[in-house]
Amino acid sequence: AQSVTQLDSHVSVSEGTPVLLRCNYSSSYSPSLFWYVQHPNKGLQLLLKYTSAATLVKGINGFEAEFKKSETSFHLTKPSAHMSDAAEYFCVVSVYTTSGTYKYIFGTGTRLKVLA
Amino acid sequence: DAGVIQSPRHEVTEMGQEVTLRCKPISGHDYLFWYRQTMMRGLELLIYFNNNVPIDDSGMPEDRFSAKMPNASFSTLKIQPSEPRDSAVYFCASTTRQGVPAYEQYFGPGTRLTVT
């Protein structure tokens, strides 16, 4: 069964320092992976997605993620954190279902805190 | 586009009462998803529709939960009778490219339900 594991439930960084949010996946075939962000009291917004076209994926707001098959990882990074990056981040895998469609499986989330 | 619209944004009700949550997907989207988010269980898929037809309702927790999609622009999630453990944030999402694994879901702002 496909799944994702987010290794940290909380991450704190200082403004201007790098961000690293970790995600490992489990899949028997090439997965489709996503990172979504949820700001307080808001819905989820897509940051970026991996579709096997390129292992380094660039997203919105300066975020990027690298797909590493050998490590079964899809970590999210940003060179310099802004206060506005404080939010909860979800790693997601898209899985094929018996009904012939795809559905999302969400990680447990990582809450990012940015310190002034 | 106004995005996915959910109403109400907040609902407080007493145990035993009927609760109806509403969702208007993005125009032209043919898939609609209902999710529940809690601290204990994270984000869970409850049910999803394709062209107004329920495809997978295996995530619906109990018979007290029901969902309908009478037309392409409206869906409801009903809980009857409600219980305190139903307290959560309920999200609706829609998409139009479900046939590929790396499709994006567009989320509404959510309805925060509190059952006392």
Image (spheres, rainbow, N blue to C red):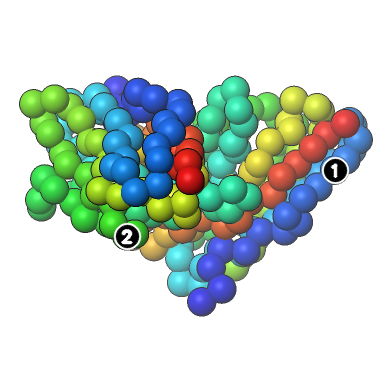
- Name the residue at 56% across, 25% down: B41
Distance Cα–Cα, label 2 vs label 1: 35 Å
Where residue A88 appears, x then y in whole percent? Answer: 48, 41
**Residue B1 numbered tag:** none
Where residue A19 appears, x then y in whole percent? Answer: 31, 40
Determine the image quadrant of residue A107: top left
Assign the C terminus of chain B to one quadrant of the image. Answer: top right
Where residue B16 appears, x then y in whole percent? Answer: 89, 32
**Residue A60 numbered tag:** 2
The three-letter code of the residue at mark 1 reads: Val
Which of B114 and B94 lies nearest the eye of the viewer?
B114
Circle 2 or circle 1, nearest the eye: 2
Is A89 rendered above or below residue A39?
above
Where residue B2 appears, x then y in whole percent? Answer: 56, 73
- Name the residue at 51% across, 76% down: B1
Residue at mark 1:
B12
How crowded pointer 1 is (Cα within 10 Å; few <14, some 14-19, many 20+) is rated as few
Is A79 rendered above or below residue A97?
below
Q: On the picture, is A31 further left or further right than B35? A: left
- Name the residue at 52% across, 35% down: B43
Which of A112 and B61 lies nearest the eye of the viewer?
A112
